[in-house]
Amino acid sequence: MALVSKKQQSIKYEGKLNEEPWYRLYPDISRYINYAGKIIDIEINLPGVKKEDIILKVLPTWFHIEAKRIKDNILYSADTNFGTEIIPTKTTAKYNNGLLAIKAYILDPLEKAKEVELK
């Protein structure tokens, strides 16, 4: 476990924070890539975390997750890749009972390509 200083915390919490040190943990992440269906399903276990204490950011090739479990000073944190290029604007996420489910759609590089007529 790595200690996290108050300056390193990027999730703001309104209210009194525990004065004890914070511990950064890498969450359990599962990834299922369906190339034929052009979908990536990712599940991240975040036990004891409230929905409002989660930050998820996505880019075309990777994502960033931070989730704070306030009661025992745990900060789940990860920067990891999708395994392929995705469409960030189509990405969705749902959180229920400690499980964050992310659905991303794989970018087809030829989707917007123009077919050139041969003469």
Image: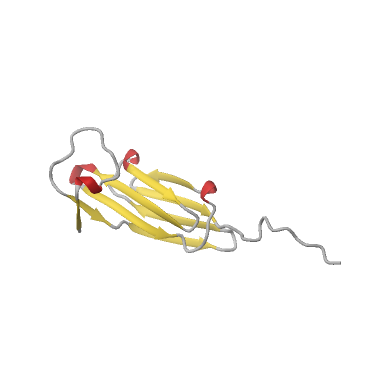
Q: Is residue 2 left or right of residue 30?
A: left
- Quarter of the image containing the N terminus? bottom left
Does 58 sit above or below residue 50?
below
- How many marks overall? 0
**At 54% from the left edge and 57% from the top edge, which residue is drawn?**
39
Residue ranking furthest to the right: 119
For residue 97, side relative to residue 110 (left or right): left
Query: Residue 38 at x, y = what percent?
Result: 57, 58
* Residue in the picture at 31% in, 47% down: 67
Q: Classify residue 1 as left or right of residue 96.
A: left
Q: Quadrant of the C terminus?
A: bottom right
Q: Residue furthest bottom?
A: 119
Give x and y (percent) for residue 27. 31, 56
Question: Residue 14's x, y, as percent?
Answer: 25, 33
Q: Picture coordinates of residue 16 (x, y %)? A: 18, 34
Whether 53 is drawn above or below 110: the answer is above
Q: Residue at x 42, y 54 (%)?
A: 63
Name the residue nearer the viewer: 63 or 70: 63
Q: For this rendering, which residue is in front, 3 or 67? A: 3
Scheme of colours in the image: secondary structure
Q: Residue furthest top?
A: 15
Depth check, front residue: 7 or 31:
7
